[in-house]
Image (cartoon, grey):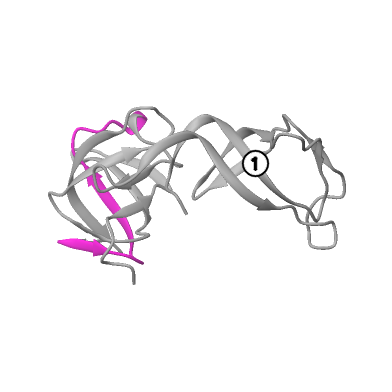
Amino acid sequence: RDTDKPFLMPVEDVFSITGRGTVATGRVERGILKVQDQVEIVGLTNDPRTVVCTGVEMFRKLLDEAQAGDNIGALLRGVQRTDIERGQVLAKPGSITPHTKFKSEVYVLTKEEGGRHTPFFDGYRPQFYFRTTDVTGSIKLEEGVEMVMPGDNATFNIELITPIAMEEG
C-alpha cells in the first residue's frame, strides 16, 4: 500500500446526505486521509478548491482515517453537490495540479493488438481516459510527421478541452 506519498483519491461518485453535507466516494490511490485534514478538489476547472474532510466512512462505519487501497466516502465541509463531480480528484493541497496541455510518448496499437486499423493525422481528436473520466483532446504531431500508422511509436503534444489533474510520469 502506497501510504507514504501525498493523499490522492479519484472521485467516482458524489451524493448529498441530508443534515451532514456532501460525500465524495472513491478508492484511495495513495497516502492517508485523516478526519479534519484539508483536501483540494482538483480537475475539470482551472482553480482547485481547498476544503476540510469532516468525516471518513468505509462499509457504513465511521473511521478516523483512510489509507491507500481503501474504498471510502469522504464528507466534505461546505461543498455543494454541484461543486464536485466524477473525474475530479481529492488530494493533499498543492500535491497535484490541473493541466490542459501535455507531451506524451505513445505506441499506437495495431488492429491485431486491439487497436486501430487506419492511420491518423495532425489535429486528430480522440477521447483521453484519466482515472474516472474521459475528455476530448487534440493531437499535434511532431514537426515533419504527417501521419501516424498503427504500430508506430510517436510523440504527441496534446491539448485537452478540460483541465485534468495530472503529474509527470
Residue 8 percent across, percent down from the top left: 33, 53
> Is 72 included in the stretch rendered in magenta?
yes
Residue 77 percent across, percent down from the top left: 18, 38
Quarter of the view holding residue 49: top left
Of residues 153 and 20, the one nearer the viewer is 153
**In the shown orientation, is residue 166 left or right of residue 153?**
left
Of residues 14 and 89, the one nearer the viewer is 89
Is 159 located above or below residue 10 in the figure?
Answer: above
Q: In which quadrant is the N terminus drawn?
A: bottom left
Label count reads 1
Quarter of the view holding residue 34: bottom left
Q: Which residue is mark 1?
A: 156
Instruction: Give the residue at x 33% y 30%.
Output: 83
Q: Is residue 126 visible?
A: yes
- Element marked by disc 1: strand
Instruction: Give the residue at x 35% y 52%.
Output: 9
Of residues 154 and 17, the one nearer the viewer is 154
- The amino acid type of the residue labelled 1 equals Phe
> Is 113 included in the stretch rendered in magenta?
no
Residue 23 percent across, percent down from the top left: 29, 44
Instruction: Give the residue at x 37% y 59%.
Output: 29
Residue 105 percent across, percent down from the top left: 62, 50
Is 49 located above or below residue 27 in the figure?
Answer: above
Q: Is residue 63 visible?
A: no
In the rendered structure, which segment of residues is drawn in magenta?
Answer: 64-82
Of residues 148 and 145, the one nearer the viewer is 145
The 10 Å Cα crowd at callout 1, few under 14, some 14 to 19, many 20 or more, is some
Q: Residue furthest front?
A: 144
Q: Residue furthest bottom?
A: 1
**In the shown orientation, is residue 157 left or right of residue 41?**
right
